[in-house]
Amino acid sequence: MFKLTTCKPAVLRGFMAIGCAFFLFGSISAQVTAQDTLSYTLAQAEQQFLQKNLTLLAGHYNVNANRALIDQAKVWDNPVLITDQNIYADGKSFFSHGKDLSGESRGQIFIQVQQLIRTAGKRARQIDLAVTTSEMSELQLQDVLRNLKYQLRSDYYTISQLFSVQQIYNQELEEMKHLVTGMEAQLKAGNIAQREYLRVQALVISLQQDITENNRNLSNSEAELKTLLQVTGNTFIKPADSLAFPTFTTPSLDTLVAAAKSNNAAYLLQQKLVLYQQQNLQYQKALKSPDITVGPEYDKASNYAPNYVGLTLSLPLPVFNKNKGNIKAAEFSIQQQQVSAQQLETELSNNIINAYSKLTFTQQQNNSTQNDFYNSYQKMFTNMMLSYRQRQLSLLEFIDFFDTYKEANIRLRQQQLNLQLAKEELNFQAGTDILK
């Protein structure tokens, strides 16, 4: 039996390092296995997101609240009842009404009802403002949905890519386990040099660091996705859709820009802000016209006639306050929002062009030559493994190829992720799933 006490200190440290690496990775794998795993397709994840996301739910409440304000704006002002009743008279009677013994009227009764009538279309202007405010709240909700949906898909595709990278690391670690097991016997027999063993040790340590970094990134993306889906507890969400190169036809740049101007919620919201300020200007101009208060009144025993019925009419005289300041402020607000709308239009066009360019560049990498390369590389890996087991390759040759194979596979997964993210960024800027 091989005894560690007969090994050189450097060799002993090497075995301990490899053992620690395997132990750490095994602990990480055990933790993931211990978690409850939920497998979602992208469609299922989006469905749960729409049903349970609290940010969207709060946005829906805000939309409903603003819709209720439209009904409130349509309601007329309540009439005002004014009354004047005597409660004490002649130093001897309280609430004296009716007639005395001689038939003379006692006490006074005064009743007046006033109704405010808004002039110059103020009520219609307020309704227009309420309708536009409600439409803006809906666009704000759509913009929130657009941003969160983009984050959801980005996290989903990223987790899928990181999970596939984790499988590559698992495959390499499994091969390294077999390699280390064989090297123990070879080292004991003196058939391999210590430098070869140290080379394997360095590879294992590097692999363990890669595994740790990949798990850290996976944990961060999982936390974001679980928050979006309102999933709590020690749960791992595993994408059911495998990461692959999507196939789609990209519309022309002009078509994309036109689609963005029709669907991008942030752009449409800015247009509504311009409309809101224009409506506010009309409302401020209407406010300079005085409102009329009109209503009947009845007066008993306090006028030239015992029972007096009259009509009251009142309105403020626009002598000092003609609302000029608010009108001027509304005019400047229109100009401000128009400049912002122009700026946002330029920004939207440039963002579409940028997203289109990144998608085009990424698609150019996905060509038949590269696909053939990765397919051939996968077949070569099988042949190289067989050659190494038959001792037709040296250890260093095998390690170099193995490391290169790992990096090539990771680049392939990253390229698949980049294409998915580029597609979703273009959909995000367009405000609709123009690329399926």
Image (spheres, rainbow, N blue to C red):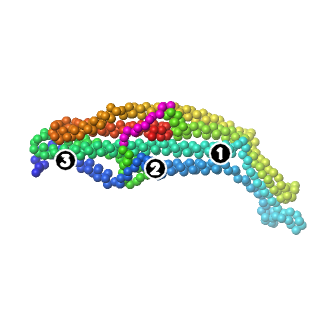
Marked residue nearer the N-terminal end (2 or 1): 2
- Of tags 2 and 1, the one toward the viewer is 2
**Which residue type carries mark 3?**
Met
Residue extending furthest bottom?
A: 101
Neighbourhood count class around disc 1 (C-alpha, 10 Å): few under 14, some 14–19, many 20 upward: some
* Residue 217 in sight: no
Marked residue nearer the N-terminal end (1 or 3): 3
Residue under numbered circle 2: 47
Q: Which residue is drawn at 10% across and 42% down?
A: 190
Marked residue nearer the N-terminal end (2 or 3): 3
Q: Which residue is drawn at 27% across and 45% down?
A: 170
Nearer-the-camera pick, 343 or 378? 378
- Tell whether label 3 touches label 2 (CB within 8 Å): no
Residue under numbered circle 3: 16
Q: Residue at x 33, y 35 (%)?
A: 371
**Which residue type carries mark 2?**
Gln
Residue 117 to residue 256: above or below: below
Q: In which quarter of the image is residue 297?
A: bottom right
* Residue 262 in sight: yes
Nearer-the-camera pick, 409 or 25? 409
**Which residue type carries mark 1?**
Ile
Residue range corresponding to the magenta coloring: 243-254
Residue 245 within the segment the image draws in magenta: yes
Residue 428: image x %, image y %? 47, 39
- Tell whether label 3 touches label 1 (CB within 8 Å): no
